[in-house]
Amino acid sequence: MRYIELFAGVGGFRLGIERAFSVQPQDAELQLEQSLSSDNGEQLQRTPSCVFANEWDKYAAQTYNKNFGGQIDTRDITTISTDKIPDHDLLVGGFPCQAFSVAGKRLGFNETRGTLFFEIARILADKKPRHLLLENVKGLLSHDSGRTFQTILKVLADLGYGVEWQVLNSKDFGVPQNRERVFIVGHLGGISGRKVFPIFGSSSEAESTIHPTIDANYYKGPSNQRRMVAMTEIRTDEAKAIRRESQRAGRDFSPRRGKVLVPRADEIGNTVTATQTKEHLLSNGARIRRLTPVECERLQGFPDNWTAGVSDTQRYKQMGNAVTVNVIEAVVRRMYG
């Protein structure tokens, strides 16, 4: 099975696909015999092969190359002719979400990043892969009163794809992160046989993501510590006392000032973001610290130190922009299992 990865970031789709196709001992004989039939009767081997990947961000490309080897294409996708892209059976990509995210200005197709969906459509029109798998923020569904999403569905339908979609939450797929994303699966020629969606996951525990040793640099200083505690929902007596003291002092900690939820180590965490403006924080009693880059990698289903080699700022950005690997694995297993 040949596939291409657009807006590849640090390779979350690719890692999820590789995991989905990894053969478990009890399934080895069955999976080696299974194959997918193309419309012309050719048998497609189940072993996945990424034949093209594109990512323009130089730091994300650096991380991608470090983990997968070779050279990812770093050109602007709008400048790449489709005849330079290999034929493929599956197109995957998380087209830039900032134009549709509630964390941004939600300009949608009025912003350059929002129009990059049409680059996917351009490639689909020429290459006609049998399947596609796209990911975006949940806000895509409601943007412009739902008209943006309906436009996307119509474009895909006009290209000959039967489309199904579902909002999935990462917390249901083995990582303790509350991250809702919409996943779109397209089938050339329409949906036949078993549908991919709905998919149901199960909740997970948070302990496995916590770093055993934390550098002091990740902890908040005393002044920020008290401010953060007062702005959070930490449920400890000490935190409540600090909050009451701050309120008596006349400090404004209303939601419009940026309420920050700080989970305990045994709770589901917030969505990992690229900018960390809502800093991803963790409480240990009433002491607050940032999550480490490794913890963010774990929350997204990546191996430890996947993003090592770039600055912490870039590591947080890369994980915030990434797809949750566990979710991709589950969807691809459903598509090709």
Image: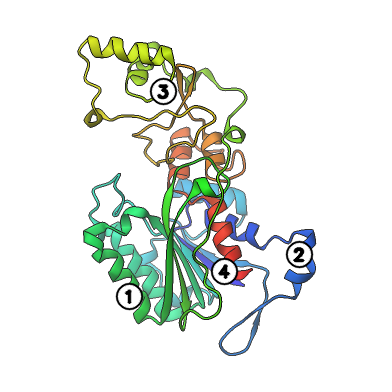
For badge 1, the amino acid type reads: Val
Observer-nearest residue: 309 or 186?
Answer: 186
Please tell me whether mark 4 sits on a helix, a strand or a loop: helix
Q: Residues within 10 Å of mark 1 (few under 14, many from 20)?
A: some
In the image, residue 89 sits, relative to residue 110, either above or below, namely below
Of the numbered discs 2 and 1, the one sitting upstream in the chain is 2
Marking on residue 278? none
Of the numbered discs 3 and 2, the one sitting upstream in the chain is 2
Residue, disc 3: 234
For badge 2, the amino acid type reads: Asp
Percent position of residue 52, x then y: 53, 66
Of the numbered discs 3 and 1, the one sitting upstream in the chain is 1
Percent position of residue 325, x then y: 55, 52
For marks 3 and 1, give the CA distance.
46 Å
Residue, disc 2: 27
Of the numbered discs 4 and 2, the one sitting upstream in the chain is 2
Residue, disc 1: 155
Give the quarter of the image for residue 206. Answer: top right
Marking on residue 335? 4
Q: Residue at x 58, y 90 (%)?
A: 40
Q: Residue at x 38, y 35 (%)?
A: 276
